[in-house]
């Protein structure tokens, strides 16, 4: 292999997966399960959020335990602006991105002074501060959160139709994945992976590692904010649970489960975890036990996560 | 209007009590982390198991002391089983694999406890002899809480002596500052790891049993206190037992004092509307602000164990 870092675009499998995803709402409606369109939309949004975290964990080596803060920032931005009378998604979602990016700039600028486990804990600290701030503010609904009333509008397409929302979310996820692939194949992405593997060496050969890491942190936060904004628009409500630390933990679990440092790791992890929950919760009240056993099996038998498993199977070894 | 000194004294004792219990949890966590380089999220589950075992044995035997003893023995056994069966395979794996595996252990432990004892919180009654208050130089303080403080102090002292004065403690400290060098110098780290893990689990059980009568014994009780324990060891510096003690007392005192006094202070300083919202919020945030500030000025905690 001549170029080991470059992420290839395999056109045929990619197109096949996109075709399946594009047909999914039609199938769900045909079998009389429209609920699954909303569920699939939620999976797509969590795939976006987990992918943004994977950029940090998998490609820069920054294990952030506070990613829920950016999801929450985006979600609450959309909720507050909608309450103020703004209904256009063209304004709401960019606003969610900007607010989350600014929060990420603030938190990242301080947190990136620390390394390793201490970075995990300081990002947790800031996320918890944001959580308690939101819980205490009556304008943000305190413990109850806010309801949005309606879904945003996006030009001629009405997001009130679940199928339309699904396709919008799918388009955003695909665009985000293409952007992430381009970013990782660009010199900036190579520099990030260099920092992950040996930061001191990167610093020694002249890369401004702090600024590069901060930029990656802001990009990931902005994408998570967009995910939060989409989530708020889909659900029609936001609550402080969206910002609490277990949410950050679940996002991290999605990334590790799917495979850190794989382009589709976040997507696979989010889909696997949410689908497993959905499928098992209908069968038994003790579904977390089953999830726990599956996660243990993944750690012990698939060290690279689910995407490692797929890649191994594909290579035929 | 000023705060009565007896109220301040009472809150300081409450803070001391919380700090000492946090130390029991943080001590095991920081040693496991420091020596084995292992992130063990399931530490909080051991605390939960300890509380449930204490409740079950107390209920069956009618003796709170027997309950504590049973909890210690049972939880240590669970800890050893966990270490031998699972965690031992993870020491050489990445932190992320450890996070995923021990998160899975949390899910499994919570569900197993739910299957055995049900979803409702169960009762762990304090000994009748300790349920009343005692007169303490001008104010009354619950006798049971005093006993918890006394027990916490005694165990903290014992642990401190064990780690700083005994041969096994020397191995532990050697392992925390440089594991490979300790191995080369002939420390049997395999057995040492299991021992440290068993002691950590036993300390969890003590904390769970002692706090059981004061807090609810319920599924999921381990998770929030686990986060507090992580805050403690981060402030103290990971791997340092002294850091864990200082961090635990800081967090216990600041959290308790913040919740008790900040709303009062804010009412004096700000208009009532602002104070009503800001007081409780800032009180909840205090320990996280403390941790962020500590890491800002000392990026590896107050007492770094390494280098």
Image (cartoon, rainbow, N blue to C red):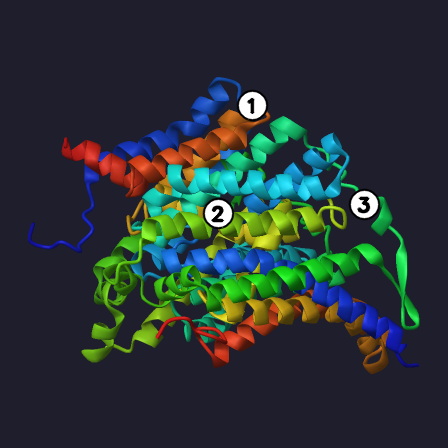
Q: Nearer the viewer, residue B218 or B86?
A: B86
Q: Is residue B114 visible?
A: yes
Q: CA distance from mark 3 to mark 2?
A: 27 Å
Q: Nearer the viewer, mark 1 or mark 2?
A: 2
Mark closer to the observer (1, 3): 3
Give the residue drawn at x 57%, y 32%. Answer: B111
Label 2 element class: helix
Q: Position of residue A316 (x, y in %)?
A: 14, 31
Q: Horizontal placement of B118 versus A29: left or right?
A: right
Q: Position of residue A281 (x, y in %)?
A: 55, 27
Q: Which residue is mark 3?
A: B127
Looking at this view, is B111 or B130 the one in front?
B130
User: Which labelled disc corresponds to residue A282?
Assistant: 1
Q: Chain of mark 2?
A: B
Q: Earlier in the sequence, mark 3 or mark 2?
A: 3
Mark 1 secondary-structure assignment: loop
Q: In the rendering, at what x and y percent does residue A303 appear?
A: 29, 42
User: In the displayed image of the protein, which residue is found farthest to the left?
Assistant: A2
Report whether mark 1 lies on the same chain as mark 3: no
Q: Nearer the viewer, residue B69 or A41?
A: B69
Q: Are marks 3 and 2 on the same chain?
A: yes
Q: Are marks 1 and 2 in contact (CB under 8 Å)?
A: no
Disc 2 packing (10 Å; few <14; some 14–19; many ≥20): many
In this rendering, the count of numbered labels is: 3
> Where does residue A91 sit, x and y in percent of width and height?
54, 59
Disc 1 + disc 3, Cβ < 8 Å = no
Question: Does residue B12 lie above or below B102 as drawn?
Answer: below
Is A142 positioned to the left or the right of B293 in the image? right
Q: Residue at x 35, y 44 (%)?
A: B88
How many C-alpha atoms fall within 10 Å of the one at disc 3: few (<14), some, or many (≥20)? some
Label 3 marks which chain's residue? Answer: B
Res. B198 mark: 2
């Amino acid at each position: 292999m001549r170029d080991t870092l470059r992420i290839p675009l395999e056109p045929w499998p990619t197109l096949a997966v996109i075709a399946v995803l594009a047909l999914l709402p039609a199938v769900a409606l045909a079998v009389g399960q429209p609920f699954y369109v909303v569920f699939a939309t939620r999976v797509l949004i969590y795939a976006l959020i987990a992918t943004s975290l994977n950029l940090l964990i998998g490609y820069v080596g920054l294990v952030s335990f506070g990613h829920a803060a950016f999801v929450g920032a985006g979600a609450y931005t959309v909720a507050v602006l909608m309450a103020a009378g703004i209904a256009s998604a063209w304004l709401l979602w960019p606003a969610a991105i900007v607010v989350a990016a600014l929060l990420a700039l603030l938190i990242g600028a301080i947190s990136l002074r620390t390394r390793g486990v201490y970075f995990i804990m300081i990002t947790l600290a800031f996320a918890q501060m944001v959580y308690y701030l939101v819980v205490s503010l009556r304008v943000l609904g305190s413990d109850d959160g806010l309801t949005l009333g309606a879904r945003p509008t996006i030009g001629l397409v009405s997001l009130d139709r679940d199928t339309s929302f699904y396709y919008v979310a799918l388009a955003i996820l695909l665009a985000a994945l293409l952007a992430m692939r381009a970013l990782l194949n660009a010199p900036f992405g190579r520099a990030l992976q260099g920092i992950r593997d040996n930061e001191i060496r990167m610093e020694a050969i002249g890369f401004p590692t702090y600024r590069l890491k901060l930029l990656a942190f802001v990009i990931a936060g902005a994408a998570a904010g967009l995910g939060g904004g989409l989530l708020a628009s889909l659900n029609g409500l936001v609550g402080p649970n969206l910002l609490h630390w277990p949410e950050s933990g679940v996002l991290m679990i999605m990334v590790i489960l799917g495979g850190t440092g794989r382009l589709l790791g976040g997507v696979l992890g989010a889909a696997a975890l949410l689908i497993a929950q959905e499928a098992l919760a209908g069968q038994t009240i003790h579904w977390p036990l089953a999830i726990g056993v599956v996660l243990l099996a993944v750690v012990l038998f698939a060290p690279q996560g689910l995407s490692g498993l797929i890649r191994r199977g594909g290579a035929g070894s | 209007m000023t705060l009565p000194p007896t109220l301040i004294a009472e809150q300081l004792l409450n803070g001391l009590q919380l700090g000492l219990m946090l130390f029991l949890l943080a001590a095991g966590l920081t040693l496991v982390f420091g020596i084995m380089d292992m992130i063990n999220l399931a530490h909080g589950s051991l605390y939960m198991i300890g509380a449930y075992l204490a409740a079950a044995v107390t209920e069956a035997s009618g003796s709170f002391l027997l309950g504590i003893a049973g909890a210690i023995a049972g939880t240590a056994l669970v800890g050893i089983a966990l270490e031998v069966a699972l965690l031992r395979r993870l020491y050489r794996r990445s932190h992320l694999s450890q996070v995923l595996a021990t998160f899975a252990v949390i899910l499994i432990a919570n569900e197993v406890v739910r299957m055995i004892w049900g979803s409702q919180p169960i009762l762990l009654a304090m000994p009748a002899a300790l349920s009343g208050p005692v007169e303490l130089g001008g104010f009354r303080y619950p006798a049971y809480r005093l006993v918890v403080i006394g027990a916490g102090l005694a165990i903290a002292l014992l642990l401190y002596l064990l780690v700083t004065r005994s041969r096994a403690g020397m191995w532990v400290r050697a392992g925390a500052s440089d594991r490979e060098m300790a191995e080369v110098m002939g420390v049997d780290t395999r057995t040492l790891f299991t021992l440290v893990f068993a002691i950590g689990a036993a300390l969890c059980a003590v904390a769970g049993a002692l706090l059981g009568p004061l807090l609810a014994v319920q599924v999921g009780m381990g998770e929030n206190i686990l986060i507090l324990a992580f805050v403690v060891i981060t402030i103290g510096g990971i791997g340092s037992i002294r850091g864990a003690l200082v961090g635990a007392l800081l967090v216990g005192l600041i959290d308790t004092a913040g919740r008790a006094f900040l709303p009062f202070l804010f009412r004096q300083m700000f208009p009532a509307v602002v104070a009503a919202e800001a007081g409780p919020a800032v009180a909840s945030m205090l320990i996280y602000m403390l941790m962020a500030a500590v890491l800002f000025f000392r990026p590896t905690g107050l007492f770094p164990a390494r280098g």
